[in-house]
Amino acid sequence: MNEERDDYAVSAEFYDVLQARRDELRVHRLYAHAVGDARLGVLDVGSGTGRVALMSLAESRVAVHAVEPARAMRAPLMSRLASLPTELRDRVTVHALPLNEAALHRVADVAVCHNTVAALPPAERHALWPAVADALVPGGSLLLELPPSRLPVHDIVRALPIQRFGEHEYGGRMSMSTEGDRIRTRFDYWVRGSAGLLREHTETFWMWPASRDQLVDDLGRHGFTAVPGERNPDVLTVSLPS
Ligand SMILES: C[S@@+](CC[C@H](N)C(=O)[O-])C[C@H]1O[C@@H](n2cnc3c(N)ncnc32)[C@H](O)[C@@H]1O
């Protein structure tokens, strides 16, 4: 029996509220083409609330493996999947473990790792790559969203666009600062009504920067080669030999 992780316990409530629409378009733009070419299966590493998994169900005809260890993120993922027609539900399997504990062997020819690698410490990344290689068939490819390439020189603060739900407004901000070899990434969320602030919440994550070349090197040790001609600077595509 695996130990449940409590990550994203605060952020899960606000994740789709503040970021879903914009990220849905981005996920489609970055991965729909590759997912549409899948002939065996799609592996979604770090599914979160399910953006890549849902896009993959819509854009492919193959099995989708959604891997999500955090219970807080899995709850909205499962609710979304529960609302799908049976034909789509029959194609998606949720694995409630980190990928390196999920024992997936040759289940997919396309893997996507969106907005996930940045928050994995180097040791967890090193455990992830062989598990991705194992889950793919020969010739399979991995598309991953690159983490920040370096530590920020100055603190960065970004407001998340305000969203209205009935009488309330939801908002937040993300603040990034360097601490040692990591990026401290703090999310502050708030909910306001007509009389003012109703509640505030905070959750802090850590991110570890890595350059594209570093990741190509790391993945090379597990049999992956960079696919030439990558058009998006935020994505790295690597593949296994056929
Ligand atoms: C920032 S969220 C992104 C979720 C989703 N990919 C998205 O962009 O909406 C990163 C997710 O990766 C999951 N995760 C962390 N370590 C993982 C691992 N070793 N294997 C699979 N998923 C992992 C976390 O639980 C979290 O839900």
Image: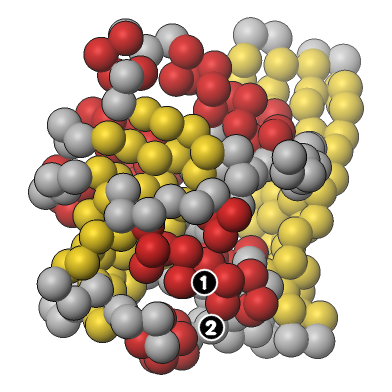
Tell me, for residue 116, which label it has, or none. Answer: none
Q: Nearer the viewer, residue 214 or 127?
A: 127
Identify the image quadrant of residue 86.
top left
Residue 52 lies, in percent from the top left, at 38, 41
Disc 2/disc 1 C-alpha distance (Å): 6 Å
107 versus 165 height, above or below:
below
> Where is mark 2, residue-wise?
210
Mark 1 neighbour density, 10 Å: few (under 14) some (14–19) many (20 or more): many
226 versus 27 height, above or below:
below
Identify the image quadrant of residue 140.
bottom left
- Are discs 2 and 1 less than 8 Å apart at CB? yes
Upstream in the sequence, badge 2 or badge 1?
1
Work out which quarter of the rendered image holds the N terminus and state it.
top right
In percent of the image, x 17 and y 67: which residue is there?
139
Three-letter code, disc 2: Ala
Position of 78 with respect to 37 (left or right) is: right
Q: Is residue 13 visible?
A: yes
In percent of the image, x 33 and y 37: which residue is there?
64
Tell me, for residue 147, which label it has, or none. Answer: 1
Three-letter code, disc 1: Pro
Mark 2 neighbour density, 10 Å: few (under 14) some (14–19) many (20 or more): some
